[in-house]
Amino acid sequence: MIKKFRLGKITNEGYLYSTTVNLGQNLGVQIEDYIKEREIRDSIKDEISKISKIVETHKNKEKKNNLAYYYKIGKNLKFLDKQLFKNVELWSVFRLIYTLLPSIFPYISDTELATKHIAITYYLGKVDENDLPKATWWQWYELVKFPKLFTAKKQYKKVLRLIKKKRCSVRSLVHGILEA
């Protein structure tokens, strides 16, 4: 038997806490899962409010292909590396961020493309800030398509040297990454 429970004070959106419980299954496990989900949701909302402050400080025309802007957002997305988010699908969080904060990329109307851009910010946030000028925005755009590259420091440095040495195009950059 499935029963919907509503707890806490009533807000504009309904009850503060609301969940569906299957009375035929272990209630302790269901409550534990609900508490974890709630903790994750609350944490995401808190972090989005911090990101919102960065978004507000940049004019719309300053956001497009701006490495410094993407990097700041990415640094704030480090919360996704916490243990709490270990089993959470990153892309679902990226999509949620864009849904709740579309002004993050006002020049992008496609949710899937915006989600990719949030992924770019996430991986750029893992880069040493001194490395940012070593590649153009488009080169970083291609680099972050290979997230494992950022944990393989030797290959990462090799690709940055390749960029500096050859002033390479995106195509040759991808080829260099695949060879690294």
Image: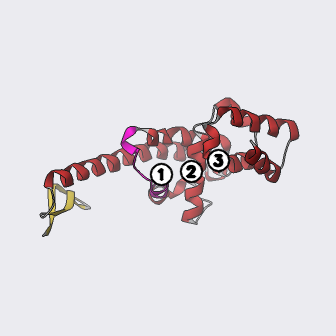
Q: Secondary structure at mark 2?
A: helix
Q: Quadrant of residue 26?
A: bottom left
Q: Residue at x 81, y 38 (%)?
A: 162
User: Does the magenta-highlighted stretch encompass residue 96?
Assistant: yes
User: Does the magenta-highlighted stretch encompass residue 148?
Assistant: no
The residue at which mark 1 appears reads as 90
Start-end of magenta stretch: 83-97
Q: Look at label 1 and name its amino acid.
A: Leu
Q: Work out whether mark 3 precedes mark 1 in sequence or the reverse, and give the earlier one.
A: 1
Identify which residue, 75 or 25, lies in the foreground: 25
Q: Is residue 24 above or below residue 126?
A: below
Q: Work out whether mark 1 precedes mark 2 in sequence or the reverse, and give the earlier one.
A: 1
Circle 2 packing at 10 Å, graded few (<14), some (14-19), many (20+), is many
Identify which residue, 120 or 150, lies in the foreground: 150
- Mark 2–mark 3 CB contact (< 8 Å): yes
What distance separates the C-alpha of mark 1 from that of mark 2? Answer: 8 Å
Label total for image: 3
Query: For the view shown, which residue lies furthest in the front direction?
Result: 179
- Mark 1–mark 2 CB contact (< 8 Å): yes
Q: Residue at x 36, y 42 (%)?
A: 84
Residue 44 % position (x, y): 39, 47
Q: Residue at x 58, y 46 (%)?
A: 121
Q: Is residue 37 visible?
A: yes
Left or right relative to 155: residue 19? left
Secondary structure character of the magenta stretch overall: helix
Q: Secondary structure at mark 1?
A: helix
The residue at which mark 2 appears reads as 119
Q: Look at label 3 and name its amino acid.
A: Val
**Residue 144, numbered label:** 3
Q: Secondary structure at mark 3?
A: loop
Query: What sort of colour scheme is used for the picture?
Result: secondary structure
Left or right relative to 40: residue 112? right
